[in-house]
Every structure is written in C-alpha cells, then in structure tokens.
Amino acid sequence: MDLRGSIPTVVHIDDGKSYDTDILDVLIPEAGAFYVMDRGFFDLQRLHRLAQAAAFFVIRAKTNLRFRRIYSHAVSKESGVMSDQTIVLTGKTSIARYPDQLRRVRYHHEETGKTLTFLSNNFMIPALTIADLYRSRWQIELFFKWIKQNLKIKAFYGTSENAVKTQIWIAVAVYVLIAILKKRLKLEASMHTILQISV
C-alpha cells in the first residue's frame, strides 16, 4: 500500500500455499522506499536484500532475537519511545544472514498498554517516526477489510486458476478506481458510500 493515498502499489495473488515472506522474492525494491511489515515477514536474508537495494524497512522484532547493543541514542520517554539502539546480531545464523548494523526501537503504546520492539535499517528518521510508520501498517488491514465487506465475490463464474484470479483482480481494480475518485475529487464520503453511489 502506498500510504500517501491508501492505494495498493503491488498486488500478488497466489494459490495460498506459500509463506508470507515469499512476496519479498517477487517484490522489486524501490530505492528510498520504506517497507513496513509485521512479524510474519521476518526473514533476515530477505531484509538484507532490501537494505542492499537502498530500500528501508520497519518490522516487528522477534522476542528471541539475539543481539549486542553498540550504542544507545537519547530518547524522550514522554513520546512513548522507551529506547533507541544501534545493534548487531549475535546468533551465528542471524549474523550470516544480516551482517550489518540494525536499529532497534522499543515503543510503549499508552492507549493499548503494549510495548513493541521494531527493527529498521534507517538510522536517520526519529525513533517515533519508526513507531508511527509501523502503526500506519494498519492501512493494509483496512484495505483487506474493505475488499471483504464491499466487494464480495458471491460466486465464482469459473473455477480455473485464471478465472478466480481475474475476478479477484476486478475487485482490486474497482477498489483502486474508487480510491482514485475519492482522492482526485476530494470527496468527504466514505469509500463504502462512494461504491454504493457508483454501482
């Protein structure tokens, strides 16, 4: 999802038998772009490939991650940022897969009471921005929710792989057209309302 317009920039439809991380093999990284992912995409080798392509990532850290702190940056705990560290991984396999330094940010969300730990390869943006970027990942969940609620595919007109993919692509195309319409015309109405008027 491009967070500037809540429009998907990459859509990959597969048979559902693959792992979440497999999309990182299909994705062509864009230099300077931020890729914000949940823990299901945690794969150090693939994350290192993103970093080598001059792209940035923000991802939830695994709880059992073994690392050594190189440096602790000053933080304002009132912002919710508990720590901002430069680290290196220490696990034998981990360091082979991601040999470079990483940024580890711990953030306490006041409303939910949860403390989350993020990893990033970007050392320039403020630590709070890393937490905000991760929070914006919710847009992808809202996209899927919207697709399920509003573009119900009640019956497949064909059951071949091509027929099913075509119908899903049509649903995604409708979503994108509605999103573009809403943004270009600066409409206040919700995506759901616009869809009801359009159909």
Image: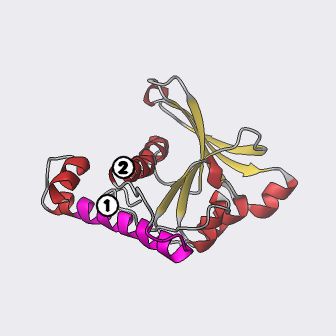
18, 103: nearer the viewer = 18
Badge 1 vs badge 2, beta-carbon distance below 8 Å? yes
Q: Main secondary structure of the magenta part?
A: helix
Return the x and y of residue 107 as percentages of the image width and height. 54, 34
Q: Is residue 162 magenta?
A: yes
Q: Give amino acid for label 2.
A: Trp
Magenta span: 157-180
What secondary structure is marked by label 1?
Answer: helix
Q: Label 1, label 2: how many angstroms apart (C-alpha)?
A: 9 Å
Image quadrant occupied by the N terminus: bottom left
- Work out whether residue 28 can be spotted: no
For image coordinates 68% across by 56% down, the residue present is 101
> Looking at the image, is mark 1 or mark 2 earlier in the sequence?
2
Q: Which mark is residue 80?
A: none
Is 132 drawn above or below residue 17 in the view shown?
above
The residue carrying mark 2 is 146
Q: Residues within 10 Å of mark 1 (few under 14, many from 20)?
A: many
66, 74: nearer the viewer = 66
68, 50: nearer the viewer = 50
Q: Quadrant of residue 171?
A: bottom left
For image coordinates 67% across by 63% down, the residue present is 18
Q: Residues within 10 Å of mark 2 (few under 14, many from 20)?
A: some
For image coordinates 76% across by 51% down, the residue present is 89
Q: Is residue 146 magenta?
A: no
Q: Is residue 151 left or right of residue 71?
A: left
Q: Give amino acid for label 1.
A: Tyr
Is 80 drawn above or below residue 19 in the view shown?
above
30, 89: nearer the viewer = 30
Return the x and y of residue 17 as percentages of the image width and height. 67, 62
The residue carrying mark 1 is 175
